[in-house]
Image (cartoon, helix red, strand yellow):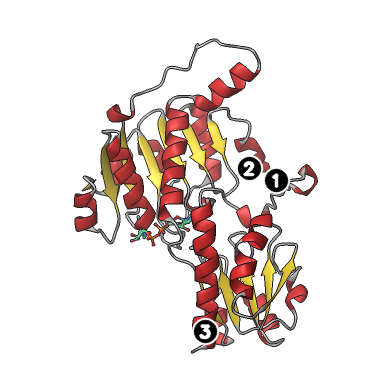
Amino acid sequence: MKIAVFSTKKYDTLYLQPALEANGHQVHFLQTRLDDETLALADGFTAICIFVNDSLTARGIEYLSKRGLKYVLLRCAGFNNVDLDAAEKFGVKVARVPAYSPYSVAEFAVGLMLMLNRNLHKAFNRVRAGNFSLEGLTGFDMRNRRIGIIGTGKIGLLTGKICRGFGSEVVCYDPYPNPEGAKEYGMSYVDLDSLIATCDIISLHCPLLPSTHHMINTETLSKMKDGVMLINTSRGGLIDTVALIKALKSGKVGQVGMDVYENESNMYFEDSSDSIMLDDVFSRLLTFHNVCITGHQAFLTREALENIAQETASNLEAFING
Ligand code: NAD
């Protein structure tokens, strides 16, 4: 089968390509992201393989399904970038990799917490500039932080578990609680309002849905503790970025660690600065020294890449074998 892989990443040629080719498929790398402008590149392919910042709209699905597309292989957990209703309508099957390595993302979320909690980002820059001053670098012991986990699925539970290892108090919220999992990891459920109002660090681990879009907004931000730290490794649309910028300006929000951001799929991050397109709101975020942003990297470990490759290849075989 001819498979079009939308990717510019070398690691996909190292992990994904051999996994797909091992089953006898022809893999063609299209060195761009998928959106309505680049659809035609996938003309005639039976399967396409895409990632988080690709966008497959209803128009795209209709167009490609009329040109032979049968399978969409998402090599990520989230699926908000594919119009699933259109896929169903046009008979295109969509698979994702729901749990390639929750540890990768949970460890990354905690890494952001530790970095911000101890001002490591500021310290690195200072020492590089020959400045060994400790002024303003006083942090907190993690054991004295109350941490709120929003969304207790695979990643949220592990994040809470790691935080418990530091002795932190961990509370959580999920409309579909997992009492056994939370108990096992020493976390307790509270209602969302209470979590928002009482935690020093709030970490988001729920999917982006119509019901969770902008769940962190002017109103919820106003109820948070002064100087709260926000961590988002889930999806950018969970946070109203304009409201967040206002809360950063007022000092309501003390620190932000984010691996994902609104309009991420419209921003095309590559190694060359020539191909970086930033929107105004995102550029404004970058001006805050208490905001640490990474480029959707939380998943990126060798273990996760291996699992993504193997799961994507087996999803395709499952489709082929009915
Ligand atoms: P999961 O499906 O295992 O868990 C999600 C949890 O969110 C579920 O328990 C669900 O009940 C809960 N939830 C749903 N609506 C909610 C709401 N309104 N409030 C609170 N909780 C709610 O998912 P997961 O694998 O743990 O992934 C969590 C998030 O991490 C997803 O958004 C996923 O896209 C993202 N993710 C990011 C990266 C990255 O590299 N940054 C990698 C993988 C996953």
> Which of the two discs, 3 and 1, sits closer to the camera?
3
Q: Is residue 59 visible?
A: no
Residue 308 spot, x, y in % from top left: 52, 64
The image shows residue 218, relative to residue 55, as above or below, that is above
Residue at 80% x, 45% y is 274
Crowding around mark 2 (Cα neighbors within 10 Å: few <14, some 14 to 19, many 20+) is some
Residue that mark 2 sits on: 282
Residue 280 falls in which quadrant of the image? top right
Helix, strand or loop at label 3? It is helix
> Which of the two discs, 3 and 2, sits closer to the camera?
3
Q: Amino acid at mark 3?
A: Phe
Q: Which mark is residue 319?
A: 3
Residue 65 falls in which quadrant of the image? bottom right
Q: Are marks 2 and 1 in contact (CB under 8 Å)?
A: yes
Q: Which mark is residue 278?
A: 1
- Observer-nearest of 197 and 277: 277
Q: Is residue 93 visible?
A: yes
Residue at 48% x, 67% y is 97
Q: Amino acid at mark 2?
A: Phe
